[in-house]
Image: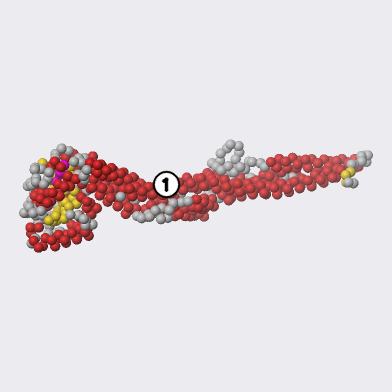
Amino acid sequence: MSRHRQVRTESTLSRRLEALNEARELAQGRLEDPVVAGVLATLERAASRRTLSAEHTVVGFFGATGSGKSSLFNAVAATDAARVAVRRPTTNAPLAMVWGQEGSAALLDWLEVADRRAGGPVPGLAAQDGGLILLDLPDFDSVQAENRRLVERLAGQVDVLVWVVDPQKYADAAIHHDFIAPHSAHGAVTLVVLNQVDRLKAEEVKPVLDSLAAILDSDGLASVPVAAVSAATGAGVPELRRRLAAVVKARAAQSARLAADVQLAATRLHEASGEGSAAGVDGRHRKQLVAGLTQASHVEDVVAAVRLSHRLEASKRTGWPPTRWLSHLRQDPLRRLSLRREGAREVNRTSLPPAGPAESAQLDAAIRDFAEAGSSGAPGPWRAAIRAAARSHRAQLPDALDEAIAGTDLKANIRPWWWQLFAVLQWLALAVAAGGLLWLAGLAMLGFFQMPVPPTPRVQNWPLPTLMAVGGAVAGVFLAVSSKFLALLGSANRANRARRLLRSGVAGTAQSLIVDPVEAEIERCRAFQKALAAAR
C-alpha cells in the first residue's frame, strides 16, 4: 500500500472510530447495555492497537482439535517450537514467532502472550517488508474453558485470522456456527486453510475444497481465499507463506481488521436501535399540548374570576353611591384565589384546588398525545426514550403550572379611564339630588312651623328642588346601569386578555418541562443515526 493511500485509510478509520464513539455515547441509556458495552470494548481495543506497533502484522492460527494447526504453524514458520503430539489438546498457551523484534514487546504484552520466539530466515517471509508475529493458539473447541476464553479474546485482537480445518471436520456445524461464522464480518483479513490434504486422494481434493467454499459462503465468507496444504508433506506451504508475506508487505491488515470491527459494532448498534426516523413535533402539536394543559390547570376558573373581579371592582367604583357599599360585602374572586397583586409583591402559589383524578388524567392524556406525535416513526428504543423524556418532569408539572398561573400578571389593577369619570359624575348626581332633597326639606320645615315660605324657582313649571332631587336620582341610576354595561364589555376584554396571558405562561412551562426534553431526545436520536451512518 502506498504511503498516501495508507494515510488516507488511517484518516478514514479515525473518522469512523470518532463517529462510532459518538453514536455509542448517544446510545447510552437508550439501547441495551450489553450492546453499548460491546461497542465500548471495540473502541478500547482499537485505541490500544493503534498506539502499538503499526509495523507488525499479527497473524493468529485458529483451529479445532486434530486440525493439525500447530503442525502447520511449525511448517510455515520453519520451526518445531509449537508442541505437536498425539495427545490432545497439546497447545495450552499461545506461542509467538516474531520477525522484527523492535516494537513487538509492547504489542505482545497487550496480547498477553508470554512465550515469544525470534523467527529465523524463512523463504517467502521477507522480514524487510515489515514485522510479522505468528501466533499458535489453543484449540478453539477445547474442553478447557480457560483455553476457549483465551482464543475468543485473541480472535478479537489479532490482525489476520487463519482458520485451519481438516478433511474430517471441515463441515462440522459447531465449528462454523460457534467460531467461524461469528467472524464473517472480518472476511478481508481472513484466510481459510484446508490442512492434511495428503490424507485425501488427488481426485477428492477439489470436491472437498468446493464443499468447504460453499459452507463458507453460507457463513458469510464467500470471498475468503481457501488454501489446500499439507503440513506433513509441505504441499501448499510455500504458497501460504507468500500470501502471508503479501499481507505483511501491504501493511493494511491492522486497518482492515479495525475497519471490520467498526463495521460490526456499528451494525450491532443499528440492529439494537432498529429502523425508522422520528417525525418530530410542530406548532400544531405544541398548541394541542398547551390546550390540554390549560384545560387541566383551571385556567378557565381564573379567567372567570378575572371577569367577575373586573365587574365587581367597577361596581365598587362607579355604582350608585347609596347602594355602592353592598359591593364591598362581596369578596374579590382574584383575592380569594391569591391572584390579586398588591404593589410589587410576587405571588408564588395560588389557592386553586389541587389536581384531582380528572385533571391528572387530562395532563397524562396531553403528554401522551404529544409524545406519540413526537415519537411517531422512531425506532423502538428511541420511541420509548422520547416518551420517557415527555414524562420526565410529570411529578413537578402540577406545581409548575400553578406557579406559572400565580406568576402571570393578569393586569387586574389597571383601571379604565371612564371609572374616574363615572365616579365624579355619580358624586355630582348625588350632590344635586341631595341638594334638591335638602331644599325640599327646608321648605317643608318652614311650612310646618307656619313661617313664611319663599317662592320656589321653577323650570318649565316644575319646582327646581324637585327637579334636582328627581334628576339627580335618575342620573345616578342611569350612570350605574351604564357603568354595568360598560363593565360587562370591559370584563369580556379583560377575560380574553387574561386567557392569552395564562396560556402563554402554561406554554412556557410546557416548553421547559415537556417540549424541550422531547425535542432534545428527538435530536439525540437523529444525531445517533447520523453518527452511525458515518461509522458504517
x and y, in percent, of residue 410 in the image = 59, 43
Q: Residue furthest top?
A: 344
Q: Which residues are magenta?
A: 130-134
- Please give the name of the residue rendered at 7% of the width and 46% of the height, measured from the top-left corner: 79
x and y, in percent, of residue 156 in the image = 22, 48
x and y, in percent, of residue 412 in the image = 62, 43
- 24 with respect to 135 (left or right): right
Q: Does residue 465 lie above or below 277 as drawn? A: above
Provide the major secondary structure of the magenta segment: strand
- Please give the name of the residue rendered at 37% of the width and 53% of the height, measured from the top-left corner: 381
**Amino acid type assigned to the residue bearing label 1 in the image:** Ala
- Please give the name of the residue rendered at 19% of the width and 54% of the height, measured from the top-left corner: 224
Q: Can residue 318 be seen at all in this image of the molecule?
A: yes
Quadrant of the image containing the N terminus: top left
The residue at which mark 1 appears reads as 520
Q: Residue furthest left?
A: 233
- 210 with respect to 374 (left or right): left
- Please give the name of the residue rendered at 17% of the width and 44% of the height, measured from the top-left corner: 249
Instruction: Please state which of residues 445 and 49 is positioned toward the viewer in this rendering.
Output: 49
x and y, in percent, of residue 24 in the image = 32, 47
Q: Can residue 158 be seen at all in this image of the molecule?
A: no
Q: Secondary structure at mark 1?
A: helix
Decide whether residue 93 is among the magenta residues: no
Total marks shown come to: 1
Figure colour scheme: secondary structure
Q: Residues within 10 Å of mark 1 (few under 14, many from 20)?
A: few
